[in-house]
Image (cartoon, rainbow, N blue to C red):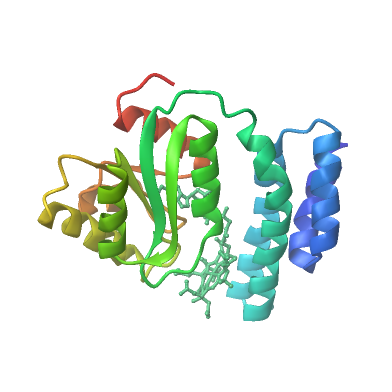
């Protein structure tokens, strides 16, 4: 039954059906399904298919935009369920954003939500953010960790620029740096001089706890 619902959720993203996506997300929660499973086994499958269809020229930019909007509609229903009761003490402060030139926000926002759900105070600075904007936010928040997301091979370079800029302004010893995003790899993060890389939102939580040396 749940598999069927996940498949339907994925299909709403491919077909561009926001109302159906919202209704299915609500139905999933009413059935007691795990919101993270709905995201990973439903919405993610759909948006990856949209990406594939775009790559091979069957879909164009409007379908990409619509697919993302459908996913966001369903996430609006599912993310509050991920957050649950926020009664934990703050374990650390994280500034997170998508790097300059990159408008992809969904993965970054999901990571921000999961970190919040696990006791981190998250300052989400949004998308298309320069190194200077990240640095201003790190200073303002006195952050323990900064997380930078990049979804394009072209904007991954901005992650490296961010690490260098953080060193140049003398903050490198004060803040841990984590990188993520579909094209990013462990070895790229290492070469860029970051403290860690996370493949998905769950590993981002593990990494954040490790970086600040706190028990999960
Ligand atoms: Co774009 N796009 N896009 N896009 N888009 C990709 C990334 C692409 C792979 C599609 C494709 O061709 N198959 C391709 C990149 C190719 C490349 O660089 N190699 C691409 C392209 C080419 C483009 C444009 C250039 C298209 C154009 O204009 N011709 C353009 C660029 C705009 C820009 O940024 N300057 C563009 C635009 C867009 C939209 C704006 C239309 C839209 C985004 C809307 C939005 O975010 N509001 C969009 C979308 C939706 C996609 C795909 C289909 C889906 C991305 C997504 O949201 N995934 C994507 C194809 C794909 O990824 N398969 C594609 C769901 C999300 C939950 O996953 O973001 O990977 P993801 O996040 C994961 C992990 O990566 C990780 O955890 C998350 C949860 O598991 N993670 C982190 C992410 N950030 C992290 C940070 C961390 C840790 C983990 O720590 C800090």
Quarter of the picture containing the C terminus is top left
- At x 39% / y 19%, what residue is drawn? 215
- At x 36% / y 71%, what residue is drawn? 154
Q: Quadrant of residue 199?
A: top left
Q: Quadrant of residue 150?
A: bottom left
Q: Position of residue 37 (x, y in %)?
A: 69, 38
Depth check: give the residue in front, 107 or 122.
122
Depth check: give the residue in front, 99 or 63.
99
Quarter of the picture containing the N terminus is top right
Q: Position of residue 70 (x, y in %)?
A: 72, 62
- At x 50% / y 45%, what residue is drawn? 111
166 left or right, relative to 198: left
Q: Position of residue 171 (x, y in %)?
A: 16, 47
Q: Report how many numbered discs are placed on residues in the image.
A: 0
Q: Position of residue 98 (x, y in %)?
A: 42, 60
Residue 55 in view, yes or no: yes
Q: Quadrant of residue 62?
A: bottom right
- Furthest toward the front, the residue is 140
51 left or right, relative to 212: right
* Above or below: residue 162 compared with residue 82: below
Residue 60 in view, yes or no: no
* Above or below: residue 65 compared with residue 201: below
* Above or below: residue 14 compared with residue 5: below
- At x 69% / y 51%, what residue is drawn? 76
Depth check: give the residue in front, 173 or 199.
173
185 left or right, relative to 177: right
């Amino acid at each position: 039954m749940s598999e069927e619902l996940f498949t339907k959720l994925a299909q709403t993203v491919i077909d561009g059906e926001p109302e159906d996506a919202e209704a299915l997300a609500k139905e999933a929660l009413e059935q007691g399904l795990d919101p993270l499973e709905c995201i990973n086994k439903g919405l993610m499958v759909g948006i990856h298919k949209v990406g594939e269809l775009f790559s091979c020229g069957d879909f164009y930019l409007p379908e990409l935009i619509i697919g993302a909007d459908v996913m966001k509609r369903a996430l609006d229903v599912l993310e509050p369920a991920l957050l649950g009761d926020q009664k934990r003490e703050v374990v650390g402060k994280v500034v997170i954003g998508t790097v300059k030139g990159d408008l992809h926000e969904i993965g970054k926002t999901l990571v921000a939500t999961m970190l919040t759900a696990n006791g981190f105070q998250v300052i989400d600075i949004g998308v298309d953010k320069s190194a200077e904007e990240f640095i201003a936010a790190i200073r303002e928040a006195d952050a323990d960790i900064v997380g930078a997301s990049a979804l394009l091979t072209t904007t991954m370079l901005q992650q490296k620029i961010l690490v260098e800029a953080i060193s140049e302004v003398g903050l490198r010893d004060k803040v841990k740096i984590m990188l993520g995003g579909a094209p990013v790899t462990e070895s790229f993060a290492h070469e860029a001089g970051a403290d860690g890389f996370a493949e998905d939102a769950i590993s981002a939580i593990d990494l954040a706890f490790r970086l600040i040396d706190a028990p999960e």
